[in-house]
Each structure stands twice: as C-alpha cells, then as structure tokens.
Image (cartoon, grey):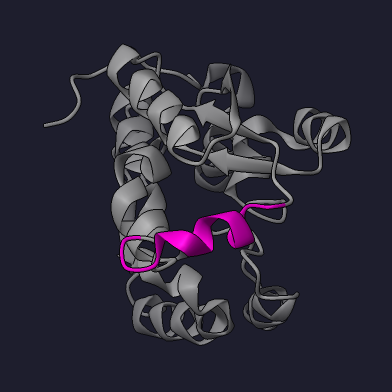
Amino acid sequence: MDGGTRTLAIACGALAREIVALKRLNGWETLDIECLPPELHNRPERIPAAVKAAIDGARERYERIFVAYADCGTGGMLDKVLAAEGIERIPGAHCYEFFAQAEAFAALNDAEPGTFYLTDFLVRHFERLVIEGLGLDRHPELQLEYFRNYHRVVYLAQLEDAALSAAAEACAKRLNLAYERRLTGYGDLATSLGSAIGVPLASITHRKEATPWPR
C-alpha cells in the first residue's frame, strides 16, 4: 500500500484500462488518473500542449504529478514541456517499448524492422484505429501500399487472454502478415507508476489474470 500523498497520472487514453488494472492490482489507493483522448496519437504534435494544459489544471490539487506517456511521436517536444514543469514520464519512445521493455524491444526490432506491433488496446480497437483510421474500409487497395515493407505482426500482450490472442492473430491474417505473440504484462508502465507513487519496486505486481473479452 502506498502512502498518503495523492499522485495524479496524466495518461494516454490508450493506457486507461491498464492503469486502472494496475491501481487495483497493487492497491494504489492514492493514485488518481486523468486520461487524454487516445486520438491524440493521430496528431502527436498536439500531445505536448494537451499534457501542459492538464498539468496546469492539476497543479493546485496535486503535490505529485506523473505523465503516463512515452515520447509518442512528439520528437522530444513532450520532454521539453516536462523538463520545464519538473515532471517525469514513462521512459521510451512509445508504448511498445515500455510494455516489452527496452532491451527486449530492441531485440525484436533488430530481428525484423518490418514489424507491425499490437497491444491489447490496439487489438480491441483494430477495426476503428487501423482499418478505418487508415481508410482501408473505403479503399482496401491501399493495404498493399501501406504494409508493403512489413513482414510480421508482433502482439505484445498485457493479458493472458485467449480471445484477445485469437483476435490478434486474425488481425495479422487480415494484413497478410506472419504472426507472433509475446506476453509482456505491464512492463515499465508498472514500474514507472510505482516509482512515481513512491512504492518499492520489488513490491509491484506486473501482471494480472485474464478478464473476459469482449465485454
């Protein structure tokens, strides 16, 4: 159990389910969560300003603030905002890296640079974020162009969940790519949040049992 000082995690909406799960799993009762729209990933240049606005709105209410984003395509602009504010974020370039953890992700990427990564969130929302987001529902002929340099899908699974795994494999088949699954649990998301709250790293639980999906 963490201490009495409340901590706010300003988080990417794509991590909401995972952060709530970690909070419950570890008993982090003093952790509050404010999620920004996951659609910001479509316009990463807007992430730093959105995070700054959330920080400004929380300063009077929280002594401790942590940003549950990686760089997420901001090209270092998010780090400039956070350095000025004296606030830390999850290390890494993106959620694939912090779920898999840096060394393991680097090995995956070195083994096959042409890899399309999925997380639990992306599997759940594949149709909306990938198929519709790339316009493949309207122009399926674009799939070959978009994915011509990809050779495999790697599903970085946060949960041991048969339904999600089957859905991820179906995503790979839809893209005509080879499929591989790696169970990562919550990776550096868990340790970063625990560190922000001030709990011992050895006490952090990184994984929980599967829950039914879809709901």
Q: Residue at x 31, y 32 (%)?
A: 21
Q: Residue at x 37, y 17 (%)?
A: 208
- Please determine whether, in this image, residue 44 is positioned above or below residue 116: below
The answer to whether residue 41 is above or below residue 209 is below
Quadrant for the C terminus in the image? top left
Image label count = 0
Answer above or below: position of 197 versus 7. Answer: above
x 38%, y 25%: residue: 26
Magenta-drawn stretch contains 140: yes
> In the rendered view, does 45 fall on the left or right side of 53?
right
Residue 210, given in percent of the width and then of the height, sits at 30, 15
Q: Percent position (x, y) of residue 58?
A: 36, 76
Locate residue 191: give its quadrant.
top right
Q: Is residue 89 visible?
A: no
Residue 115 in picture, x, y percent from top left: 69, 40
Q: Position of residue 7 (x, y in %)?
A: 41, 55
**Residue 154 position by quadrant:** top right
Left of 198 or right of it: where is 23? Answer: left
Q: Is residue 200 visible?
A: yes
Is 101 covered by the magenta stretch?
Answer: no
Q: Is residue 178 left or right of residue 77?
A: left
Q: Nearer the viewer, residue 88 or 61?
A: 88
- Picture quarter with the N terminus: top left
Q: Which residues are magenta?
A: 137-148
Residue lying furthest front in this view? 141
